Structure formats: C-alpha cells, structure tokens
C-alpha cells in the first residue's frame, strides 16, 4: 500500500512538473500589442495572449514575489508581445503617466477579475461557524404594509450599533458538507440579500433598504458594511496538486455557468490561495442495466470543461469565480490543478 501511495505522489508531482515545462501557447490571433482600456481585467488580457491564461506569470517572467505584489496596470498602458533570443514569447509594459495620489492609483488599476461580480463576497465574511450570525443585528419588524421588503422599504432592527450607518443584509445559510465525507460540515454559508442604511438610531433602530437582491424579511441579519480590500494578485496555477469538489453554486441553485460564484471543498489549509486558477472537471455517474437487468453505476471519466479563479479563501473552503465554462457547473464537480 505504501508503495502504491508513493507511486501516486510521484506521478502527481511529475505531472505538475511536466505541465510547467510545456512551452507557452499563444492564443489564436494573439495581438502584437494591446492598449489597456477601462473595463479590462487581467484575466481578459491574459486570454488575448495565451491559450492557457493561468500561465500569465510565465509570459511576464514573474517570480513568486512579483505574483504576490505585481506591478499595477492602468488604462492607457501598452502591453507588447515580444520574443527572446530563443524565440520564446514574453510580454513587456510601456507605462503611461500615473496618477500621483495613491488612492487614485488603487481605484484606476486594472482588476484581476470583474470587481462588481465579487464585491459582496470580499467585503464581509460569508463562511461562518455554526451560530456565527446569532449575535448580529436582526430585523424584528417591517413597515406596516409589508411582509417582505424591497428597495426603499423600512425595517426595524434590534442590536444595531448607532454609530454604524451602512450595513449588509444576510440570511442564515445552509451547512456545507464535505462531498467526500457527508457527515463533516466544513462551514455555514450566509446568503447576501442586499444593503441597508440606518436612518434613525434606537432599539429598534429604523433602517431603509438601499438594495435588495432577494426579498428581505423579519429575522434576517445585518452586518456592518466595510470597504472591500483591494488585493494585488495575478492569475496563476497552484504549485502543488489541488483536488477538491464544488460544494455549492451561490444563490441556492444546483447548477451554474460562466460568472457564477462557486464554493469548493479546499481552502488555505490545503494550499489554496487567492489568484489560483483551477480546472473544472465533470464528475458524473450514469445508471444502466446489465445483461441480467440489474442496475449498475458507471462512472464516466472526468473531462475538463471550464476554469475557476479563486478570489477568497477560508481555512477549509474557498470562493471562486467561473471565468470559463463549456457547460453547466454542478455540485460535486471536480476542481483540480490545471
């Protein structure tokens, strides 16, 4: 058994080395240069130049420190495709004049993936321990003519800090089980419902619903809103083998597609980090009948159908944005090192 396990570890390590040693493949009709415009993301730009966008650090000749703290790219910058003496492709940057104020630089720099999609997921914690929202502010009553609240409606909230004006609204979520051990709970997911503004302090305090993604009602919880932390990272593949499963598609649906938010059963304790790009592989079993008319389960070989970009990690769970998909994503699909 030990020999078998050792062989498997060596095979996995060899596969990672071989993947990293493969020559870079430029995208079809890769441009000789690209002028960065507002709305660009690092992932979009990567895909313009590379068939494998997660190899972005390689074509930039980046080391580990540069992946963690990359140079910022701004609208107006020119990215130029060149080749070295060995004919290997690389990218270089011709930077334009920069804003002088640091806050403006943070605002104007090109993000790695669409910030409007992931903002609610990086501004407040969404994976909580059991009972983690029990002490949070709570809606105890709605305006007289409303059972559920939408934009512009009034809510009355207990246990709200009077000094805090802006809040995010959540609902206690479902437990997230490990697909490989259905008795192990990895955490609890809280559903983001919208945002609210405290207009009058008190007990209960008066709130106005500012945005509502879903109906908001009595018993829903409020957490103080904070500014999302801007993180410098670039798309890159994990150095070690990651082998996990999709455990939920955010929004309470069973399937998703491109730009869906998914949670997966691997986190920081497993070596997953922000910026990792992972392959999505189909995990499917079909039921057929054999020659004796007995039902048999047939496991279909896994097949890659998409890519996911990790943007937030917890100890045992990570959130990722599906950046590429040739089919529907389903709970229990594999997430693996590409």
Image: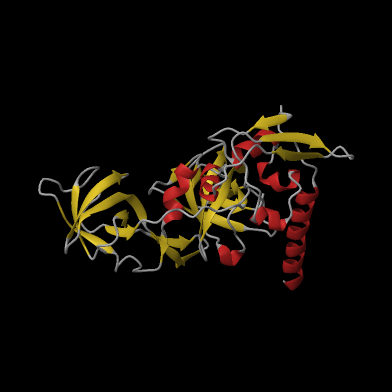
Q: Which of 124 and 26 lies nearest the eye of the viewer? A: 124
Q: Is residue 265 left or right of residue 71?
A: left
Q: How is the image coloured?
A: secondary structure
Residue 120 shows in this picture: yes
Q: Is residue 72 left or right of residue 313?
A: right
Report the quarter where the N terminus lies: bottom right
Residue 100's place in the image compared with 231, above or below, is: above
Quadrant of residue 158 within the rendered picture: bottom left
Residue drawn at x 23%, y 43% as measured from the top left = 150
Question: On the image, which quarter does residue 95 sit in?
Answer: top right
Residue 96 x/y as whole percent: 65, 37
Outermost residue toward the top in this view: 29
Residue sticking out furthest to the right: 85
* Residue occupying the point 36% across, 59% down: 174
Left or right: 21 with respect to 182? Answer: right
Residue situated furthest left in the rendering: 144
Residue visible at 60% across and 59% down?
A: 272
Residue 29 picture location, percent across and down: 71, 27
Q: Can you say whether 166 is above or below 33 in the image?
A: below
Residue 315 x %, y %: 52, 66
Q: Nearer the viewer, residue 338 or 208?
A: 208
Q: Give the answer, above or below, for where 162 lies relative to 49.
A: below
Say which of 280 and 292 sits in front: 280
Locate residue 270 relative to residue 226 in the image: left or right: right
For the point 67% across and 31% down, the residue is: 34
Residue 119, how many percent across, how many down?
44, 48
């Amino acid at each position: 058994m030990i020999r078998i396990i050792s062989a498997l570890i060596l095979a996995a390590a060899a596969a990672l080395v071989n993947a990293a040693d493969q020559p870079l493949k430029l995208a079809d009709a890769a441009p000789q240069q690209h002028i960065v415009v507002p709305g660009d993301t690092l992932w979009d730009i990567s895909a313009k130049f590379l068939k494998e966008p997660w190899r972005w650090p390689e074509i930039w000749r980046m080391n580990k420190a540069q992946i963690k703290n990359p140079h910022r790219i701004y609208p107006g910058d020119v990215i130029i495709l060149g080749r070295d003496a060995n004919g290997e492709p690389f990218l270089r940057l011709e930077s334009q004049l920069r804003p002088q104020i640091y806050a403006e630089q943070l605002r104007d720099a090109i993000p790695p993936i669409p910030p409007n999609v992931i903002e609610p997921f990086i501004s407040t914690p969404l994976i909580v321990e059991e009972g983690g929202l029990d002490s949070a502010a709570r809606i105890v009553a709605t305006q007289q003519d409303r059972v559920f609240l939408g934009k512009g409606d009034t809510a009355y909230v207990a246990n709200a800090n009077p000094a805090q004006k802006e809040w995010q609204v959540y609902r206690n979520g479902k437990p997230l089980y490990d697909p490989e051990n259905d008795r192990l709970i990895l955490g609890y997911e809280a559903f983001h419902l919208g945002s609210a503004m405290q207009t009058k302090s008190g007990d209960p305090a008066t709130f106005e619903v500012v945005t509502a993604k879903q109906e908001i009602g009595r018993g829903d919880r409020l957490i103080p809103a904070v500014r999302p932390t801007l993180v410098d990272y670039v798309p890159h593949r994990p150095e070690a083998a990651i082998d996990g499963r999709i455990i939920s598609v955010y929004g309470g649906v069973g399937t998703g597609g491109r730009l869906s938010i998914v949670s997966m059963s691997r986190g920081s304790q497993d070596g997953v980090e922000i910026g990792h790009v992972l392959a999505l592989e189909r995990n499917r079993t079909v039921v057929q009948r054999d020659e004796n008319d007995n039902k048999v389960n047939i496991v279909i070989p896994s097949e890659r159908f998409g890519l996911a970009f990790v943007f937030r990690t917890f100890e045992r769970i990570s959130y990722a944005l599906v950046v590429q998909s040739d089919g529907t994503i389903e709970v229990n699909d594999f997430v693996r090192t590409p």
